[in-house]
Amino acid sequence: MDPEFEIVNHAEPFIPKIKSTRYTPQRITHDLVDSGRELLRLFKEIPGELREVLKNAREGKLKLEFEYHGLDRTLFRLDLISGRACAIVLASLIIGSSIIVFSKTPPKWHEMPIIGLAGFLIAAVMGFWLLTSMPQKRKRHEN
């Protein structure tokens, strides 16, 4: 913990020894031979692998898999946004159907405008769907 200690000055005598052991002709030759063997093995394997990929592509069996990390959070936010948009449409449908029912616009069924009743029916189905899909979306994103 000496602030005046300079590691470079103390390590300098050891650097030639490290260089001499690391860069000997035998070591360089050994590394080149190992790299050459790996390269030859790679050149032997490539044609067979390439042939198999092309065969699978011709037969329609070629699979491409990729994984994008961080997509779950984006999908969760997209589900939230779509749920809110659906709720806005649902509220608009209820308000619009109420206006049509109170305006008593024909055609009517039992003194109630059919278009207003249809709007309420669609709103009921849409609301039920929205309520039942929300817990499923949360469970899917919690896992």
Image: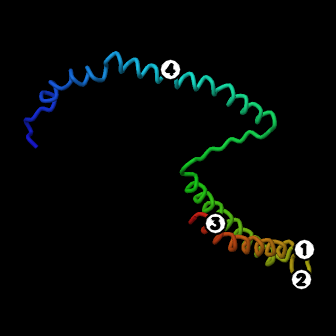
Q: Earlier in the sequence, mark 1 or mark 2?
A: 1
Q: Nearer the viewer, mark 3 or mark 2?
A: 3
Task: Identify the residue under disc 2.
Answer: 111
Q: CA distance from mark 1 to mark 3?
A: 40 Å
Q: Earlier in the sequence, mark 1 or mark 4?
A: 4
Residue type for callout 1: Pro
Residue 90: numbered disc: none
Q: Secondary structure at mark 3?
A: helix
Q: Residues within 10 Å of mark 3 (few under 14, many from 20)?
A: some
Q: Which of 3 and 111 lies nearest the eye of the viewer? A: 3
Q: Residue at x 60, y 47 (%)?
A: 67
Q: Residue at x 69, y 65 (%)?
A: 86
Task: Identify the residue under disc 4.
Answer: 36
Q: Residues within 10 Å of mark 4 (few under 14, many from 20)?
A: few
Q: Residues within 10 Å of mark 2 (few under 14, many from 20)?
A: few
Q: Secondary structure at mark 1?
A: loop
Q: Earlier in the sequence, mark 3 or mark 2?
A: 2
Q: Is residue 72 above or below residue 36?
A: below
Task: Identify the residue under disc 1.
Answer: 106
Q: Residue at x 78, y 73 (%)?
A: 125
Q: Earlier in the sequence, mark 4 or mark 3?
A: 4
Q: Residue at x 65, y 60 (%)?
A: 82
Residue type for callout 3: Lys
Task: Identify the residue under disc 3.
Answer: 137
Q: Secondary structure at mark 2?
A: loop
Q: Residue pushed farthest top?
A: 25
Q: Quadrant of residue 127?
A: bottom right
